[in-house]
Amino acid sequence: MRLPKVVPAVLLAAAALLAGCGPEADGPSFVAAPATSATASSTGGAPSPPPRPSPSAAVSPAAGPKVPGRTKAGLLPPVVDHGPRRGDLVALTFDADMTDNMLAQLRNGNVRSYANLAVIETLERGKVPATFFLTGKWVQRYPEITRRLARNERFELANHTFGHQAFTADCYSLPRIPPAGMTEDVAKTFKIIEGYGGRQTRYFRFPGLCHDRAALRALSPLGLTVVDGDVVSGDPFATDWRPIVKAVLGQVKPGSVIILHVTEANARFTDEALPHILKGLAERGLRPATLSEVLGA
């Protein structure tokens, strides 16, 4: 069954900003990716440009849990926005974007870092579980930080493509990956991430959340679950920490998947917002958990 999906304007603006990129020894253990119904998401609390027509489409998953490996021929991978709306668990997810343009900004000294260590330190000090969606190029640029993430038993590692290219023809200024290269791009990124061990998953997030049936079909051999999210923080273009907190706490519910970023120069206030988000979740009786725990709750 095919359901319409509207990509939040906040996320679209974030994708456009990231495309522009202004200054700013154990083996892997795989986590099964459960299937959950997809729903449209909304946002608020941060400025955004006028929405553009979305190329995204959500596809409801087949019945039963996903397991690592290959999807049966002809089946599309599950697409999920959130977990069950019961209990007290929510998923904190952090995207680690890296494009060729961002790498150029680092090389020429326009940008100091696209790795927000303060975010990681806050999670470590509070023993807070989180799931990190890593691009292959971010991993290659920050191998020691990736090892740090992998060593933390409360962190999961997931896939955000190799170079944050778009998988649809119109994805908010992101350069497009050729359709013939989609499968290999994602497979290569899984292989890069797997080399770091830790809590590996078969979760995947499209850049800009842009995907259509052709993109999903290209990923069907990889045995993955596509994770969008129902709480878009807007942190990549926020000019203060307060709108980020407002956006998250104004949308969050049991089972929510919260989208944040760990790309410091392109999400400058995430580290300031995070303690307030954690405090607000606790006040609402909500508890951060890994994505696999939330989706499998």
Image (tube, rainbow, N blue to C red):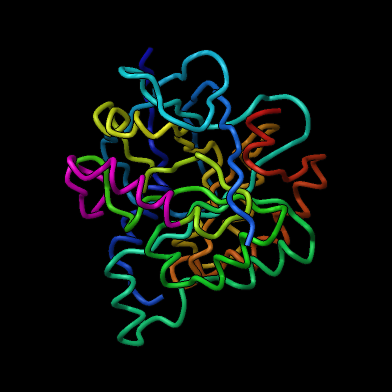
Q: Is residue 145 magenta?
A: no
Choose between 212 and 232: the one closer to the eye: 212
Residue 265, placed above or below residue 39:
below
Residue 253, quarter of picture: top right
Q: What secondary structure predominates along the stretch shown in magenta?
A: helix
Residue 83, quarter of picture: top right
Quadrant of the frame with the N terminus? top left
Q: Position of residue 262 (x, y in %)?
A: 53, 63
Q: Residue at x 71, y 61 (%)?
A: 123
Choose between 294 and 17: the one closer to the eye: 294
Q: Position of residue 101 (x, y in %)?
A: 27, 70
Q: Residue at x 75, y 46 (%)?
A: 281
Q: Position of residue 252 (x, y in %)?
A: 65, 39
Q: Residue at x 50, y 58 (%)?
A: 195
Q: Is residue 156 left or right of residue 166?
A: right
Residue 109, placed above or below residue 166:
below
Q: Position of residue 291 (x, y in %)?
A: 62, 40
Quadrant of the frame with the C terminus? top right
Q: Is residue 217 left or right of residue 242?
A: left
Residue 261, placed above or below residue 6:
below
* Segment tinted magenta in the rendering: 170-192
Q: So how many labels did they put on this image?
A: 0
